[in-house]
Image: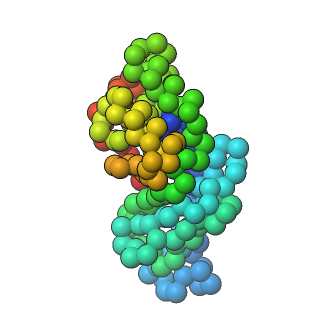
Amino acid sequence: ITFKITDNLGRSSSQKASVEIKDDALNCKSSESMTLVGKIYTPNRFGVGAVNVTTENMEVPVKTLENGTYVINELSRNQNQKVVPYKNTDPLNGVSTYDLVLISQHIIGKKEFDSPYKMIAADVNRDGYITTFDVVELRQLVLYIKTGFSNNTSWRFIKADFEFQNPNNPLVELLPES
């Protein structure tokens, strides 16, 4: 499974989660359950650690290790499982004042973003539009006035093979983040 991850400034990378289903007595407590093993990593094959990974039936998420791997035990057989990655830490990771310039240039039409993922990341307040309100919120974060986003997470995981209905306006679509 490949996810496209975009930070709030438009930088994006693909993340792949490998799924290995093991069907042996050592990894399954009963013949009615299975183990899901996966990995979330960057295109450069660097694992992404500290990502919470859940399925619909899990009460407590598992965290990816530093190398991006995770293991979910005792999943029911013959039942669809939606795997949901989530990470909302260190919102300034990779963010700089230059990102404010890029968003501003997009808003005034001087240099528009060339990727739907950059547009999704530029919608800092996640209201479905790229406006000066996004620049203001990001500036508050850069200046340490705020410590996080008011209505967004620092990481968003979107399937890399998702085909946008309108790549020039991806903010009007429901995005597959699982």
User: What is the x, y in percent for residue 8?
Assistant: 47, 40
Corner quadrant of residue 82: bottom left
Which residue reaches farthest top? 110
Whether residue 152 is visible, yes or no, is: yes
Q: Position of residue 34 (x, y in %)?
A: 50, 75
| Nearer to the camera, 67 or 91 | 91
Relative to 96, residue 61 above or below: below
Query: Which sits in the foreground, 10 or 81?
Result: 10
Residue visible at 52% across and 57% down?
Answer: 89
Residue 117 shows in the view = no
At x 42%, y 33%, the residue is 135
Residue at 44 percent across and 81 percent down: it is 32
Q: Is residue 78 above or below residue 147?
A: below
**Outermost bottom residue:** 29
Residue 117: x and y, percent? Answer: 47, 34
* Nearer the observer, 165 or 104: 104
The number of discs equals 0
**Relative to 52, is 163 on the left or the right?**
left
Task: Name the one closer to the observer, 120 or 41.
Answer: 120
Residue 125's place in the image compared with 110, above or below, is below
Q: Is residue 38 left or right of residue 79?
A: right
